[in-house]
Image (cartoon, rainbow, N blue to C red):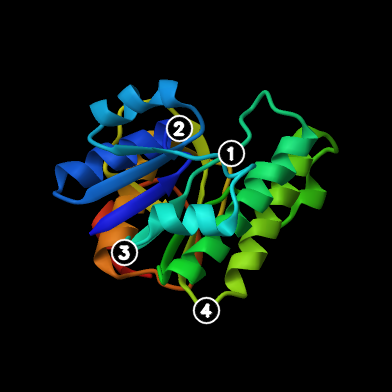
Amino acid sequence: MRIAIAGGHGQIARLLGQRLSGEGHDVVGLIRTPEQADDLRAAGMEPAVISLEDASVDDVAEVINGCDAVVFAAGGGPESGRARKWSVDLMGAVLLADAAEQAGVRRYVMVSSISSDAPENVDAGVFQVYLYAKGGADADLRTRDLDWTIVRPGMLTDDAPTGQVTINPDQQRQPITRGDVAHTLAQVLTSGHAIRETFVVVNGTTPVDEAVASL
């Protein structure tokens, strides 16, 4: 497969790119600055410099043309303000979906967030704006005639990956390693499972491939 990852310099994106390229897939990472390119190459990814805040649908469609799937793993970042939550986490995801439709890329995997379906339950502030943006991006994607999957990881950690997860746990605010999120995304992309599914994933007791196959 040829897979494009928006937000290619993020930690999960690079772990995903490294895993996919190690499995023999071609991976393109969309990044904002040329200075990030060497980090992507080190992860086995092909860098493509393009800003989702400034590019047109045509621009993005040209970059992802010929891909079998796209992954939205971009974000304004923890230090960004309210405006970038809307311009990246919401509008960037919408732009990628528009470009995927234009380029004929049917598979779209969204890296979302727990609580994005109920941001009103979170104290007001920038994080609440982030959740409204993520929820809006998820809602937009569900209206599309695409083979979409929305993955909502639990509380992210940098611990060593376990290879075991629980999908749709009773308590969502549980941890999951970034490596296990990347593993789950890779399995979703390559297995053909979980199309038109939205799910929360945390660390658990089920091997990733079995958990994804259950969807």
- Mark 3, secondary structure of its residue: loop
- Mark 1, secondary structure of its residue: loop
- Crowd tier of the residue under label 4, counting other residues whose Cα lies within 10 Å: few below 14, some 14–19, many 20 or above: few
- Crowd tier of the residue under label 1, counting other residues whose Cα lies within 10 Å: few below 14, some 14–19, many 20 or above: many
Residue 93 position in % (x across, y down):
59, 54
Foreground pick, 174 / 55 = 55
Q: Amino acid at mark 1?
A: Gly
Residue 135 position in % (x across, y down):
68, 56
Q: Amino acid at mark 4?
A: Asp
Query: What distance separates the C-alpha of mark 2 from that of mark 4?
Result: 27 Å
User: In which quadrant is the N terminus drawn?
Assistant: bottom left
Foreground pick, 84 / 33 = 33
- Mark 4, secondary structure of its residue: loop
* Quarter of the rendering containing residue 46: top left
Question: Mark 1 or 4 closer to N-term?
Answer: 1
Which dot marks residue 68?
3
Query: What distance separates the C-alpha of mark 1 from that of mark 2?
Result: 9 Å
**Above or below 202: residue 98:** below
Dots 1 and 2: beta carbons under 8 Å? yes
Note whether residue 139 is visible. Answer: yes
Dots 2 and 3: beta carbons under 8 Å? no
Q: Amino acid at mark 2?
A: Gly
Dots 4 and 3: beta carbons under 8 Å? no
Question: Mark 4 or 3 closer to N-term?
Answer: 3
Determine which residue is flagged by label 4. Answer: 145
Query: What distance separates the C-alpha of mark 2 from that of mark 3?
Result: 21 Å
Q: Residue at x 71, y 50 (%)?
A: 133
Determine which residue is flagged by label 1. Answer: 75
**Above or below 47: residue 26:** below
- Mark 2, secondary structure of its residue: loop
